[in-house]
C-alpha cells in the first residue's frame, strides 16, 4: 500500500534540490503533486519527470513571497483537485555573510523568501485545510536556525522564525485536525551546497557531524513522507532533525581507552 495514495500535495521549491526529491517521492507514494517554484522551467522538468514515471503532477510558477501569487497557487490547486492534503514549504534561499557585511536588501530578501514565504503559503493552505477539517503542513527549517553558525545571521534568523511559526501554527491548527511539523536538515548535498560550500566549509561540517557526511536529498524526502503520512497523525509541533547527529553532538574526539 502506497503511503500517500490519493492525497493532493503542494511542494514549494520543487524545481530542484530537496523540494524536487520530495515531489518525486510523494508521487511515488501515490500523491498528486503541485510542483511550485519561482523557476518555471525547473518546475516543468520535475513535473515531466514525475509524469514520465507514471505519477501525477502539475507545474505552477510562483514567488512564495508574493501574497497574490500564493493565493492563486492554492486556489488553482483546489479548482483542480478540490482539496489540499499536504503542504511542504521547501522554497528557500541561502546566505553566508558576516553580520557586519549583511546589507538590508540581503537581510530582507532572505527573510521574505524563507520566513514570509512560509507564512503566506501556510496561511493560504490552512484556510483550505480548516474548511476540509484535515491537513498536514511540513516546513523545511535548518540546523542553522538552532545553532549560531558563522555567517548565518539572516539565514539562521529566518529558519529560527520558521521553527516558532511551526509551533504556533501547530497549536492554533490542532482544533481543525491540521498538524504542523518541520524537518531541520544539517547540510545536504544539493545544487545549492554544490556551489556555496567550499572544501573548508565541508571539512568544518564533517568534524561536527558524528556520521561524518552530508545528508542526501532522499534522506530528507523520506522524513517528509513520514510526516505527510497517516503514520504521523499524532505528531504535531515537532522538529525532526535529519542531521547525522549534528544537533546532539558536543565534543568529538578519538578516545583510546
Ligand atoms: N541544502 C542544504 O544543505 C540545506 C540544509 C538545511 C536546510 N535547507 C533548506 O532546504 C530548502 C531547499 O534547499 P536546497 O538546498 O534544495 O536549495 P536549492 O537552491 O537547490 O532549491 C531551492 C528551490 O527554491 C526555489 N525558490 C527560491 N526562491 C523562491 C521563491 N521566492 N519562490 C518560490 N521558489 C523559490 C528555487 O528556484 C529552487 O528551485 C531551503 O529552504 C533551504 O534553506 C537546505
Image (spheres, rainbow, N blue to C red):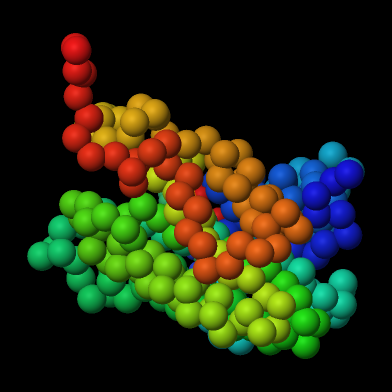
Q: Nearer the viewer, residue 196 or 169?
A: 169
The answer to whether residue 63 is left or right of residue 150 is right
In this figure, what is the number of numbered marks? Answer: 0
In what quadrant of the picture does the C terminus appear?
Answer: top left
Is residue 146 something one can see in this rendering? yes
- Residue 127 pos. (x, y %): 68, 86
In the image, residue 28 sits, relative to residue 132, either above or below, namely above
Please, which residue is most extreme toward the top here? 256
In what quadrant of the picture does the N terminus appear?
Answer: top right
The answer to whether residue 157 is left or right of residue 85 is left
- Residue at 70% from the left image edge and 63% from the top image edge: 233
- Residue at 48% from the left image edge and 45% from the top image edge: 242
- Residue at 55% from the left image edge and 75% from the top image edge: 170
The answer to whether residue 47 is left or right of residue 140 is right
Is residue 10 something one can see in this rendering? no
Q: Nearer the viewer, residue 149 or 94?
A: 149
Quarter location, residue 220: top right
- Residue at 67% from the left image edge and 58% from the top image edge: 232
- Residue 218 pos. (x, y %): 60, 39
In the image, residue 257 sits, relative to residue 61, either above or below, namely above
- Residue 92 pos. (x, y %): 46, 61
The answer to whether residue 154 is left or right of residue 179 is left
Q: Nearer the viewer, residue 181 or 213?
A: 181
Amino acid at each position: 500500500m502506497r503511503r500517500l495514495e490519493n492525497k493532493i500535495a503542494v511542494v514549494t521549491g520543487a524545481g530542484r534540490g530537496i523540494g524536487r526529491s520530495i515531489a518525486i517521492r510523494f508521487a511515488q507514494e501515490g500523491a498528486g503533486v503541485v510542483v511550485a517554484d519561482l523557476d518555471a522551467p525547473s518546475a516543468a522538468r520535475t513535473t515531466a519527470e514525475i509524469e514520465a514515471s507514471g505519477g501525477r503532477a502539475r507545474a505552477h510558477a510562483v514567488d512564495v513571497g508574493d501574497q497574490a501569487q500564493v493565493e492563486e497557487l492554492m486556489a488553482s490547486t483546489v479548482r483542480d483537485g478540490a482539496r489540499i492534503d499536504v503542504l511542504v514549504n521547501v522554497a528557500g534561499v541561502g546566505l553566508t555573510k558576516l553580520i557586519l557585511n549583511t546589507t538590508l536588501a540581503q537581510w530582507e530578501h532572505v527573510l521574505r523568501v524563507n520566513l514570509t514565504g512560509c507564512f503566506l503559503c501556510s496561511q493560504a493552505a490552512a484556510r483550505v485545510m480548516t474548511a476540509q477539517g484535515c491537513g498536514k503542513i511540513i516546513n523545511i527549517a535548518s540546523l542553522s536556525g538552532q545553532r549560531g553558525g558563522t555567517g548565518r545571521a539572516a539565514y539562521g534568523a529566518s529558519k529560527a522564525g520558521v521553527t516558532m511559526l511551526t509551533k504556533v501554527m501547530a497549536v492554533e491548527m490542532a482544533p481543525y485536525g491540521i498538524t504542523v511539523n518541520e524537518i531541520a536538515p544539517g547540510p545536504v548535498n544539493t545544487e545549492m551546497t554544490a556551489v556555496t560550500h567550499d572544501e573548508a566549509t565541508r571539512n568544518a561540517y564533517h568534524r561536527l557531524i558524528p556520521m561524518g557526511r552530508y545528508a542526501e536529498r532522499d534522506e530528507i524526502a523520506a522524513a517528509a513522507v513520514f510526516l505527510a503520512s497517516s503514520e504521523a497523525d499524532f505528531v504535531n509541533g515537532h522538529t525532526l532533525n535529519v542531521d547525522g547527529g549534528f544537533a546532539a553532538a558536543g565534543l568529538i574526539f578519538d578516545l583510546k581507552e
